[in-house]
Image (cartoon, helix red, strand yellow):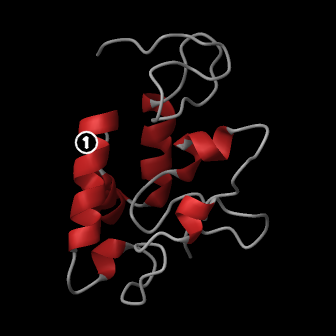
């Protein structure tokens, strides 16, 4: 059984700005209800037919698409899909989500922060340098 808020690539969908967007909320790329964002619906990793639940289960892990996504997220957002996947593989989904919830919580309003912005979208608290 997989937790539906974790994408096959290792992204915690609850930390995505599209998931947190109150006007046009994306339900996450694994959701069977609601309308996923076009970028998620067209994602080569999400639509890959070689994986089971997670990319690390694939014989060609990490593939070119995943490596490119990881590089982009490392550079832009300071987060690694490969690190996330290794964490899930070694510690499990529940431990991964617990770790993410601690790491990405806003210190002011206690809501989850998105990895895509340098501030909390709920209270506009700036991200603290770690």
Q: Is residue 29 visible?
A: no
Q: Position of residue 2 (x, y in %)?
A: 54, 71
Packing grade of label 1 (10 A; few <14, some 14-19, many >=20) is: some
Residue at 44%, 54% (x, y): give it: 11
Q: Could you say which quadrant of the image residue 22 lies in?
A: top right
- Vertical relation: 81 (above or below) 124: below
Residue at 49%, 63% (x, y): give it: 7
Q: Is residue 48 visible?
A: yes
Quadrant, the N terminus: bottom right
> In the image, 123: left or right of 23?
left
Q: Nearer the viewer, residue 48 or 31?
A: 48
> In the image, 57: left or right of 126?
left
Q: Position of residue 73 (x, y in %)?
A: 31, 45
- Vertical relation: 7 (above or below) 76: below
The residue wearing badge 1 is: 74
Q: Nearer the viewer, residue 42 or 19?
A: 42
Q: Nearer the viewer, residue 11 or 66?
A: 66
> In the image, 27: left or right of 69?
right
Q: Position of residue 41 (x, y in %)?
A: 58, 69
Residue at 55%, 10% (x, y): give it: 125
Quadrant, the C terminus: top left
């Amino acid at each position: 059984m997989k937790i539906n808020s974790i994408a096959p690539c290792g992204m915690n969908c609850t930390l995505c700005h599209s998931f947190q967007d109150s006007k046009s909320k994306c339900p996450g790329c694994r959701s069977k209800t609601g309308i996923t964002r076009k970028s998620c619906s067209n994602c080569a990793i999400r639509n890959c037919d070689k994986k089971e639940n997670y990319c690390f289960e694939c014989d060609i892990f990490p593939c070119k698409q995943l490596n490119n996504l990881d590089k982009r997220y490392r550079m832009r957002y300071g987060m690694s899909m490969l690190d996330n996947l290794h964490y899930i593989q070694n510690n499990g989904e529940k431990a991964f989500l617990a770790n993410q919830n601690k790491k990405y919580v806003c210190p002011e309003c206690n809501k989850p922060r998105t990895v895509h912005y340098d501030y909390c979208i709920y209270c506009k608290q700036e991200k603290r340098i770690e």
